[in-house]
Amino acid sequence: MGPDRHDPSGSAPPATNLPRRERLRLVLECDGAACVWCRRPIETDLVRATTEHVVPRIKGGPSWLENEVAACARCNRERGHRTPADWIDECQRRGWQPDVDAVVRALRSLQAAIAERGGQRRARPYVATQLRRLDRR
């Protein structure tokens, strides 16, 4: 497990100010070089790494580093706008072993960032619901 995404000092720059490659580097540092959903190694010649919003933008998820996890392009594309808990269920149905701990860490980090920075009216209840669902496992 890498460092926590949430920087309570406020010194971490928002992900929107960082180039894509730098955001990806930071997310891979936190999550490791494997897709959090299917666990395939990423950043290889065969599997392209992406950052994926845990709370989709369409559901009110901010473009903050705390809301991003490492995912392969296939999982990022196939997940669409499904909730993290629903997509974890689908991954398990497919026989994959998603990194539930990494997803929960990202959700908790996002929850802390929202509490500190404020706003994110739509994302707050979404995060809380997903954490309740994933904590029951």
Image (tube, rainbow, N blue to C red):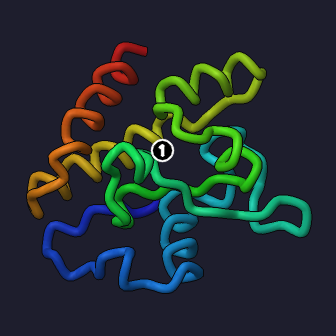
Q: Is residue 114 left or right of residue 16?
A: left
Residue 129 lies, in percent from the top left, at 28, 26
Extreme-front residue of the structure: 58
Q: In the rendered image of this protein, does residue 29 appear above or below residue 39?
A: below
Quadrant position of residue 66: bottom left
Which residue position holds label 1? 102
Residue 96 lies, in percent from the top left, at 73, 28
Q: Judging from the image, what secondary structure is the residue with disc 1 in?
A: helix
Q: In the rendered image of this protein, does residue 5 appear above or below residue 120?
A: below
Quadrant position of residue 97: top right
Residue 1 lies, in percent from the top left, at 49, 53
Q: Is residue 90 left or right of residue 20?
A: right
Q: In the rendered image of this protein, does residue 68 appear above or below residue 45?
A: above
The residue lying at 57 percent from left, 27 percent from top is: 88
Q: Residues within 10 Å of mark 1 (few under 14, many from 20)?
A: some
Q: Amino acid at mark 1?
A: Ala
The residue lying at 46 percent from left, 37 percent from top is: 101
Residue 84 lies, in percent from the top left, at 48, 34
Q: Is residue 53 left or right of residue 130?
A: right
Q: How many marks?
A: 1
The residue lying at 21 percent from left, 34 percent from top is: 125
Extreme-right residue of the structure: 46
Q: Is residue 7 left or right of residue 4?
A: left
Q: In the rendered image of this protein, does residue 43 appear above or below residue 41?
A: below
Q: Quadrant of the C terminus?
A: top left
Depth order, front residue of 81/15? 81
The residue lying at 28 percent from left, 44 percent from top is: 108
Quadrant position of residue 135: top left
